[in-house]
Image (cartoon, coloured by chain):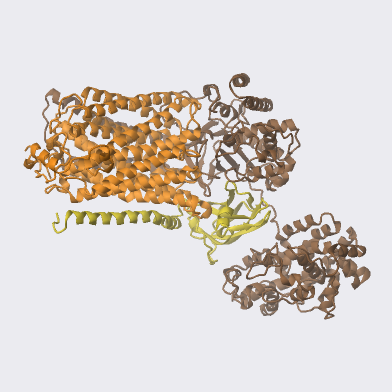
Chain colours: A orange, B yellow, C brown
Amino acid sequence: MSAVVAEHDEHHEHEHDDHDHGPEKGWLRWIITTNHKDIGTLYLWFALVMFFVGGAMALIIRAELFQPGLSFVEPQFFNSMTTMHALVMIFGAVMPAFVGLANWMIPMMIGAPDMALPRMNNMSFWMLVAGILLLSSTLFMEGGAPAAGWTMYPPLVLQTGKALPFAIFSVHLLGISSIMGAINIIATIFNMRAPGMTLMRMPMFVWTWVITAFLLIAVMPVFAGAVTMLLTDKFFETSFFDAAGGGDPVLYQHIFWFFGHPEVYILILPTFGIASTIIPVFSRKPLFGYSSMVYFTASIAFLSFIVWAHHMFTVGMPLAGELYFMYSTMIIAVPTAGKVFNWTATMWKGAMTFETPMLFSISFVVLFTVGGFTGLMMAIAPSDLQYHDTYFIVAHFHYVLVPSAIFMIMAGGYYWLPKWTGNRYNEKIGQLHFWLSAISVNILFFPQHFLGLAGMPRRIPDYAVQFTDWNMISSIGGFIFGFSQLLFLYIVVDTIRGGTGEKATNEVWDGALQYGGGGTQGLEWTLPSPPPYHTFAKPPVIVPTEYQH
Amino acid sequence: MDDALSLKQKNTKIVKILVVVVIGMFGFGYALVPLYDVLCDLTGLNGKAKSLAAEEVPYKVDMTREINLELITSLNESTPMEFRAETKQLKVHPGEYYTVYFYGENMTDKLLNAQAIPSFTPSIAAKYFHKVVCFCLDQQIFKPKESKRMAMRFAVKPDFPKDLKTITLSYTFFDNTKAAVQN
Amino acid sequence: MNAVFFEAMQTIQEFIIYYRGVFSVKKTKQLFAGLILLVSGLGTVQAAEECPSKLMEGSVCLPKGFPVEPTPGGYTLNLTEGHTQISHDVYDLHMLILWICVLVGIGVFGTMFYSIYHHRKSKGHVAEQFHENTTVEIIWTIIPALILLAMAIPATKTMIEMDGVEESDMTIKVTGWQWKWEYEYLGHDIRFFSSLDHASNMARQLDSNTDPRSVAHYLLRVDEPLVIPVNKKIRFVFTAADVLHSWWVPDLGWKKDAIPGFINEAWASVDEPGIYRGQCTELCGRDHAFMPVVVIAMEQGDYDAWATQKHEQECKAKSNVDMSHDDLVAKGAEIYEKNCSTCHMPDGDGIAGAFPALRGSAVVNGDINAQASLVLNGKNAMPAFGKQLSATELAAVITYTRNALGNAKGDEIQPKAIKAKLPKSDDDDDGCAAKPAKTDKDDKPAKADVADTTEEPAKTSAENPGASKKAVEKPEESIAATKPASKSLNNIVEPEVIKPSMSKPNWADSKASSGHTTHTASRHADLIAAGQTVYETNCTSCHQKDGGGMPPVFPALTGSAVVKDDIKAQVNLVMKGKGSMPAFGGKLTPVELAQVITYTRNALGNANGDAITADQIEKLMHGKDEPTTETSAAPENLANKIEEKDLKVDDTKVNTVKEAKATADDKAAAVAGEKTLDELVAQGESVYEKTCQSCHQPEGVGMSPVFPALKGSAVVIGKIDAQIELMLKGKGMMPAFGSTLSAEDFASVLAFTRNKLNATGDFKQPSEIEALQSAN
């Protein structure tokens, strides 16, 4: 029942590599590379840099909100910060991080030599860089960066200065980049699985990503269309959203959230995949309810298309509309709760150890559930008329993005770092990073629930005096959280440079081989650490685990 | 797996399919615009009213019911006009035709192209409001300092839901001069 | 006592701000802040003196013993319970879901932590290898579904309750602006803007040096709160003027978006007097955080008192008394801070690239009237303040900008001058006469089209008493003059016959005193002035007011060859018609023809300098085709020449005219007996040919798309009253025939269109039309 990848002994692999082609020499390697591991590394580094850029913006926001009164920045700049923070974090940090993980891991998990479309892979990365640079350049433009929120609602967004067309074009670039990434992932998963790697044997990370990729393909073009309509409304006299010409600003919100709600799941589904990969390994127990996990994920993805207007309960929909979107949104709680129960059941009666990836995963399950609870509260339309556009919402979506998406990306980082580098990271500093992050993230976001309930609207640079105390606590939490992340940067650099000095074995984690895959062994753990530049040139032989379906 | 096709062919095929899906979804984004209008017509969503004049079809007048119609007027930000309803409130019987007048005046000494946008609450009322004449159907061109008395002729359809007793109809004038000049 | 103490503390606080300011900010800012303090300080003291309870919230004097709650403390944990039935229901719903979530959380996390504690490797626990259990999985899919169902029931109930805006006691229209709220009590003649209060606004500036904690209700106080009665169902209607906003008062239990061009509604019935505070909750730009909402709920009696006072205040504000230069500047500083400083900045420096500086600005230092126009009507991103501020406020702020912010023009503009530039809004007259009442009192008599057109001739000939009187007489005149004229349509001699009923003073008078020759007595200028009125009544619908016509259907008169060439030919054309141009020979009197023809030749961009008299026209009508045109005479000479024979119009003449008109009316009434449908239709045919055919075409086929067909027309087939209404009042290019057709002609043409062009079978008697005409 152990690794049966006979053909792939280390020696053979290296020989094979040497007289094939290794990486380019020098810096040019990173520009022209078509290797999935190189591109994965580029994506992950880029995401990490953007995480700090977006984080710095968040700290400007939290500093301004430390106490009432305008202390540091102009309101308009503050609005630019909230807008850019969101765009950078979503399109610059979280999505590229997932694509980076997908690039690194999907070929290794399904026994493919590389991504299906390697050159397109390179192009989509550099298009992402171009898009983000273009977006960042708006910060220095006359009239400032976009300040109408990442949702870019007209008519306000049309008041943006010179930055508007640049911001829209950057959204186009980012959209094209992620669509190309998604096409590549779908092609890889559909065409390049090793013989015997049936769909229902794929690791959950691969499953969640293929569903995410379909979501991306379905909704990114819609978003591109929506911002193009903004562009033509502003410069070419169309009136999609201008009431004067027979348009309707509310229509934008419908189109935007038709994209926006699936987009939220694009940010969370791969997270589920990583959790479903890590939790079994450290519980030394197979994932509970593999097939139901697949169905739950698919049904969440489907439901995400029919619930969009729950972001718009206050725009004045007819009663029937409000009720429909309330009911359909509530239904999402069923598959989501199912997933949480399955993770809990996976831990139940396991033999758990608590290395950093597991710590992050457990805190993910707990804090994501908290975010899910507030999500359920917000699904109740009458109550949402109180919660809407307050800090309660800010708290909710940060709970499902920071201690969920970001935590699981980091958990994935800790989990696979020894595989990528061949070195073990410093577990003590890793755990310190976890505890600092997990505690400070709650200091940061939990009080925001109270602020929202007490009546503090979101996207404001200054607030009434009674909101001071919780804002101060939140800001303190924010700064602790922000600076704690430098530990992660340290660990990554340190591990690449040799880490603890202990070399990682092929399996790295006790049980990773057995429990780290889906219906098969975790294929990436059959490879050496670090894996050679080219892997699975010849497909591995897939041996199903005994619990496969 | 299908061995008949090489990996490259299979990849090309899947890329082709997905590119078509992407283009289709981009188009779908645009298709949402007319779909939304259809939805608005069907459900009265957002109180958006059709901007077409209807034929004056005779309805059976329901004298037993009286609906309170409120007419409110607004001007979008920089529309330099005076605009008000001559009658701000009236009781109407479903099925009967009424004509009401609005007063509009251009406050500038320049030509003004303005468009009035109707909106209803409850939004469902848009569906039952039968307009045969309305100044909102076309752009109104005001000569410098010109004032106009503008008519709106309508009937509330007799099948207007029984439980509703008030209709608020709002008109907002938007300044379209710039757009009109460019066209 | 507390309130006095509070006021005093606030004043001290403001002085501290002021002195801090002296030492820390630039000189202009000191001046600015100083002015503000002065003005607002005075304002507060004054207002407080008028307020018996000495308890103020913004501009509202609260009744004695009103519950004024202090700023709430920090560390609030839960949702506000609010003060409406809906907010209670929402709160209960919130608590229900919260507790369900807490229980589910305890279950899940409890299990997880039990497992984490007991099933760990370090404790030697050996992992079991189970990995699925269909029964368990189905159970934990069904249980959440049932819980959700239990939640959905009360949620649906509350939602339906919120939706029920019917049967409200009053309606308030709320308009969101960048960055203030406008409230309009529909049917109550109360309308005002509500923006962030002065103290908060000062403290919130980036370099203010004021601790917001020292400002009462920082950012949650406005200058003009919304006041509502308790226990009344109040319906709110929302819209926005620029971008999206959202109106939220947590105590009311909901928020609603304000969308430009669209309206939304919601309702609230507050069960307890109090001051309820909220904010804008939809990102609306730079000062989104600084547009709070304050609602004061009062007992009905207190509310009524407030409403009366507010109403009087608004009326007073409209009276526009002149103010001294210093008062204007002082008041202007306050207005500037509230309305302008956000974009043009408190010191008038603007924001480069976005908002122009006012300091040293060409507009501010240029013509005061040009600046006023810009402020009133807006330009690009600058909103039209004519609709947001009162005349007094506008005068003050314009004067302020010219005499502060580094400018020193030294001039001023008075509210009255601004008033003249503002629209004559309907609040001007009706609202202020009476106390505000529940019912809508705005049913002003409809302004007739004819009355509108008289305004301009009155203006143009203001220096000539004769002409202006004529203009005033015009509406009656046109009725009296055209009724008999249209009765016998083809009778060219008709003008002679109906002369007594002619109300044109110089015509009637000249006839009586000196016979035909005196027709030339009409002064050139007089002719033109009167011609304009005739032109507007008879020609504008096709040739347009400015003579631009509507090519290719209607030729322009401006620069037209016909108008420029031989006057005789033009007279001929006007009298006999051509193409779609009707023959006016039978419709207009010789005087009117002379007037309108002279007008076209000397106005509308033409300047032939010639004229034609009624005499000459009459000669043409009688075939004596020898008009002596006066083309040779230069306009001045002509004017001089006519001057000699000018007839003075005095009051007695006007009286004569009125009597003449009365006789004509009687005659018309006598003639209008009962008619059969066939008679009417037969008669209507000729009226149609003369009056309607030029546009609606023979057989009523119309000229799509300009002139609708009458055959099968919804209007003609529809309700007869609607058609009468349309014919009486006109619509678009269709002239109002209420005063230009006699009752008999009107009834006959009505019958003709409905029974010859269509077949509705119904008609109206001339007597019925007569009644309608006079009602109009």
Q: Quadrant of residue A279?
A: top left
Q: Position of residue C490 (x, y in %)?
A: 76, 79
Q: Quadrant of residue B13?
A: bottom left
Q: Position of residue C288 (x, y in %)?
A: 51, 36
Q: Is residue A36 above or below residue B98?
A: above
Q: Nearer the viewer, residue C436 or A269?
A: A269
Q: Residue at x 19, y 37 (%)?
A: A277
Q: Nearer the viewer, residue C725 or A299?
A: A299
Q: Position of residue C447 (x, y in %)?
A: 70, 56
Quadrant showing the C terminus of chain A: top left
Q: Nearer the viewer, residue C141 or C388?
A: C388
Q: Nearer the viewer, residue A341 or C548?
A: C548
Q: Residue at x 75, y 56 (%)?
A: C455
Quadrant showing the N terminus of chain A: top left
Q: Is residue C588 visible?
A: yes
Q: Is residue A83 left or right of residue A98?
A: right
